[in-house]
Amino acid sequence: MNNEIARIFALEIKETIDEALQCCNWPYKSENDKIRKFELIKKLASLVSELLEVDGMKEKLIELANASAINGENNEIKIATFDLIRNILIHFPIYNSWDEICISKKLLKWNKPRNSHILKYFENNCNKSFTYRIFLNENNNWVEKHTITVNIPKLDENNEIYLKDILSLDDAIWTFGIIDYYLKDLGLNIEPYNFTVSL
């Protein structure tokens, strides 16, 4: 692995996550705020997708998440949900806002080899719900700041699912913190945003 190139991507990921998480701490003041958040999460999806293509990077991320005491339980579905968001944004760059993103079996089957992992997510996790809390490190104390809620409906042949009904845009941005938190441990020497995840 070329750590020098990977670190360039990792630094850009960190800066983008930092800006996106700062945006999440603000109430929507205008439509431009929502547009900026959507631009940032699309950028994150692209950057992270490239980083995870590096040999062994994705496997190491999953290994770190599963071994982490601070990450709580259900790490597999957390990573899978993060992957779902990333893959939808990468493979379907046809939407202009988070609220527009709509998934159907018809849409996913038009390029089945590339989209089978998205279908598998819905097949394996239909009718499941889970939450996990976000803590920020303030003056060496962990303070609860955010709770992510994920509701996964069943995807049938004739229905459509809006991504906003699975999780909010802010929650989706926070899922990318899973990557940010482990950038240093992935061997890229990047300090995280100073938050951790716990059920």
Image (cartoon, rainbow, N blue to C red):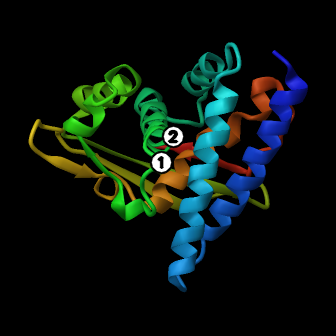
The residue wearing badge 2 is 90
Q: Name the secondary structure under disc 1.
A: loop
Q: Is residue 126 above or below residue 97?
A: above
Q: Is residue 149 above or below residue 1?
A: below
Q: In the rendered view of the protein, which quadrant contains the N terminus?
A: top right
Q: Nearest the camera: 173 or 33?
A: 33
Q: Name the secondary structure under disc 2.
A: helix
Label placed on residue 35: none
For the residue marked with disc 1, what is the amino acid? Pro
Where is residue 136 shown, x and y percent of the image? 66, 57
Does the image show residue 27? Answer: no
- Mark 1 closeness class: few <14, some 14–19, many ≥20 residues within 10 Å: few
Q: Is residue 22 above or below residue 43?
A: below
Residue that sits furthest to the left in the current view: 158
Residue 137, located in which quarter of the rendered image?
bottom right
Residue, x 60% and y 68% (percent of image)?
Answer: 36
> Could you tell me how far apart the alpha carbons at marks 2 and 1 are, in whole angstroms?
6 Å
The residue wearing badge 1 is 93
